[in-house]
Amino acid sequence: MTNFRGLVLAPLLLGGCVVGPDYAGPPGLGRAAPQSKFVRQTASTSTNDPAVAEWWTALQDPVLNELERRALAANPSIDVAQARLRQARASVRQERANRFPKAGAQATGIFADLPGIDLQSAQGNGAAPPSQDADSSLQFFNLGLNANWEIDLAGGQIRKIESANALAAAASYNAADAHVQLAADVAQSYTNLRDRQQRAAALRGGLDLQKQQLDLARQRFQQGTVPAFAIGQANRAIQATNGDLATAEAEIGIYLNALAVLAGEAPGRLDSLLAVPRDVPLPPQVVAIGDPASLLRRRPDIRAAERNLAATTARIGVAEAARFPKISFMGILGIGGTSVGDLVDLGNISNIAVPQLQWGLLDFGRTSAQITQARAGRDEAEAQYRQVVLGAFQDAENSLARFAQQRRNVAALAEIKRSADESDILTQQRFQRQVISRSDALESGRQKVLAASNLQSAVAALTASYIAIQKSLGLGWQESTYQGLATDSSTTSIGTNQ
């Protein structure tokens, strides 16, 4: 009895050991570590931390707000990410449950006929002489419970739980990243739609002026004041504008379809909501961007990469645990006998306890290879983490550079439009005084429309660069929705352990 107790207690005490490296948080970035502020930020940006959720409300466009609400509620990509998150969470519950014994009920019936063997003989070998009648049939019935339990000597199961927890947290951040990507796609498609609608309106206005120029050229040709090529020149300009208008109208349809699908609806379902043209929404005067360290803590794809690194680190312990012996117990408790009636006889209680020790002493390097694979997987995840971080910095710096350039471009085109407006006013006054020809007045009006169209396109590009900033900063998801899913506190050290 003392030896049996020692056999049971020894593995329980050893079960407190956990092999493999403990995860110590995200790795240092070395020369890739962020500076105290973004290199490309300008006076139009501030280092205040931006609001993580619903950044698009700063554009002050109610139609865009409604589109974002519909998309975040019904887009299939969000459902995909949420389904993967539920799978990851279920995996955590499964790995936790694997630490405990498995128990079940069983009912067994055995019917056997073994010629040449006397199952009722008292002989030790059970063999009956050929001349004797032998009972070679067997019937056995049993009803009871069975249980299995494998003791986690080296902590391999603990490491599996750590890995599953980290993967569940990574899945939650991937779901958050799906929100970031979707919010930016909706805002970008909406901005493009409004830009194309404004462009189409400007092209129609310019087309009316070009048709008037063509009519005037025909009149003057009939009067013999201009050559025939003036008519061809005016006609070619009209055809070019018609081509640009056809392109703009086709793109309007494309963006209407895109917004409907992003909102989880069939193409055409949102046409009535978006049919009336609106101005492209303007970004705020000053954009809050925070600093690179806050970007590391905020971007969900970086946090997902860090959690994947934690998961691969835990898998090293899972692989190393295979080097140690495994102890398992199987127990059976039931009632039964050689007849069905024995199943209700409580006096026929049978119990079996089967402890088992397994130790792969000779595997020809299989376990060593698995450990090497696990360590290489951890190294890969660490490199991927650094790659995601560098990519995030590049996205942010590129979007900030474009935003600054687009602001300058808008300012320049606004000045051109102002000049074109003033010039057109003077031209129309001179035309009314009959100082210049009608052709000159029409051309001035066309230049005014063109300047306005160019400015509208520049504003759309400015808003698009603002959207790119929000996406690069990892904005557009609710922190509270995913709070507590990263069970390892090391996720909070991202950006501070560099």
Image (cartoon, rainbow, N blue to C red):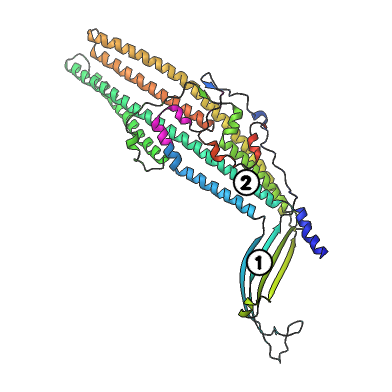
Q: Residue furthest front?
A: 346
Left or right relative to 19: residue 56: left
* Span highlighted in magenta in the image: 47-68
> Which quadrant holds residue 333?
bottom right
Which of these two is toward me, 193 or 172? 172
Q: Quadrant of the N terminus?
A: bottom right
Residue pointed to by mark 2 = 165
Mark 2, secondary structure of its residue: helix
* Camera-side residue of 193 and 212: 193
Q: Where is residue 129 shown, x and y percent of the image? A: 73, 89
Q: As displayed, is residue 151 above or below residue 303?
A: below
Q: Nearer the viewer, residue 66 or 396?
A: 66
Residue where numbered disc 1 is placed: 146
Q: Secondary structure at mark 1?
A: strand
* Amino acid bearing label 2: Asn
Residue in the image at 22% along x and 17% along y:
227
Determine whether, in the image, residue 292 is placed left or right of residue 59.
right
- State the CA–CA distance, disc 2 to disc 1: 30 Å
| Residue 329, percent from left and from top | 71, 63
Residue name at image x 18 percent, y 18 percent: 219
